[in-house]
Amino acid sequence: MLTTIILALYVNDMLIVGANMVEIDKLKKQLSKIFEMKDLGSAKQILIMRISRDRSEGIMNLYQEKYVEKLLSRFNVGNIKTRNTPLETHLKF
């Protein structure tokens, strides 16, 4: 049976994602023989993205609020007031 594992690596941060924990554990053991690694458990954040998961549905969501807040602050528009914008009634979502 083919198993898909996604390994995301950025400098010294690594995220391993997959449905088969046995295969993920095998990969981590193989990598730890070559590289010095720490297993920090389930990820709650990577880079500036917050991770949320629903294991029962098999869904993972990535949120970038912190990144957006950082951009707004950088360009000094973090305290602007929001306004409602009318939505056309014929648009369906």
Image (spheres, rainbow, N blue to C red):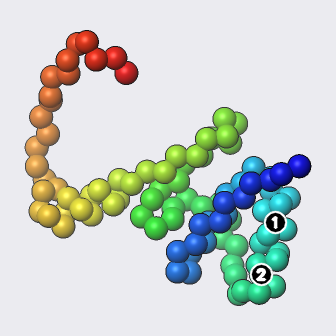
Vertical position of residue 50 compared to residue 55: above or below: below
The amino acid sitting under disc 2 is Ser
Label for residue 25? 1
What's the CA distance linking mark 2 and mark 1? 10 Å
Residue 84's x, y, as percent? 15, 29
From the viewer's perspective, tell me whether residue 67 is left or right of residue 31. Answer: left
Residue found at x 66% / y 70%: 40
Residue occupying the far front of the picture: 2
Residue found at x 89% / y 49%: 1
Q: Secondary structure at mark 2?
A: helix
The residue carrying mark 2 is 32
As rendered, which of 56 and 87 lies closer to the eye? Answer: 87
Residue 31's x, y, as percent? 76, 78
Q: Earlier in the sequence, mark 2 or mark 1?
A: 1
Residue 39 location, quadrant: bottom right
Vertical position of residue 59 compared to residue 47: above or below: above
Label 1 packing within 10 angstroms: few (<14), some (14-19), many (20+): few
Residue 60's x, y, as percent? 58, 46
From the viewer's perspective, tell me whether residue 88 is left or right of residue 26. Answer: left
Quadrant assignment for the C terminus: top left
Label 2 packing within 10 angstroms: few (<14), some (14-19), many (20+): few
The amino acid sitting under disc 1 is Asp
Residue found at x 28% / y 17%: 91
Residue occupying the far right of the picture: 1
From the viewer's perspective, tell me whether residue 48 is left or right of residue 42. Answer: left
